[in-house]
Image (cartoon, rainbow, N blue to C red):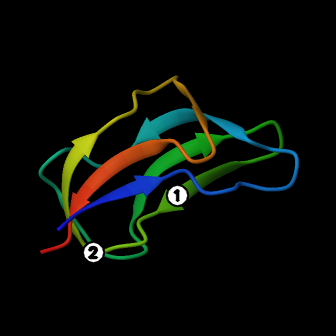
Amino acid sequence: MIEEIRLPKISENVDTGQVIKILVKAGDFVEAEQSLVELETDKAVFELPSPLKGKITEINIKEDQEVKTGQVLFKIDTK
């Protein structure tokens, strides 16, 4: 089943982040809690972990792009 991985709420009063580095490629198999992307906000730099185990089928972001809470970052096949 294809699932969407969205940017979760980062913190109160922070709704956007800048993509610093994408840590996976389409076709990669990832484990739950494996880091997918490095993001930067006004307050911190952090890595976003995968909530699911599976194969990355689509990457909907680019490095240096600003992303918003709720935006689809990746699609993952959890079969």
Pick the front one: 9 or 38: 9
- The disc placed on residue 53 is 2
Residue flagged by tag 1: what amino acid is it? Leu
Whether residue 6 is visible to the viewer of this picture, yes or no, is yes
Pick the front one: 30 or 68: 68
Query: In the rendering, at what x and y percent does residue 44 appear?
Result: 76, 47
Give me the residue at 55% from left, 50% from top: 7
Whether residue 23 is visible to the viewer of this picture, yes or no, is no
Residue 66, located in which quarter of the rendered image? top right
Pick the front one: 2 or 57: 2
Give me the residue at 73% from left, 39% from top: 41
Give me the residue at 16% from left, 56% from top: 28
- The disc placed on residue 48 is 1
Bin the neighbour count of mark 1 within 10 Å (Cα to Cα): few under 14, some 14-19, many 20 and up: some
Query: In the rendering, at what x and y percent does residue 65 appear?
Result: 52, 24
Query: In the rendering, at what x and y percent does residue 25 appear?
Result: 22, 44
Could you tell me if the residues under marks 2 and 1 are in contact, i.e. CB atoms within 8 Å?
Answer: no
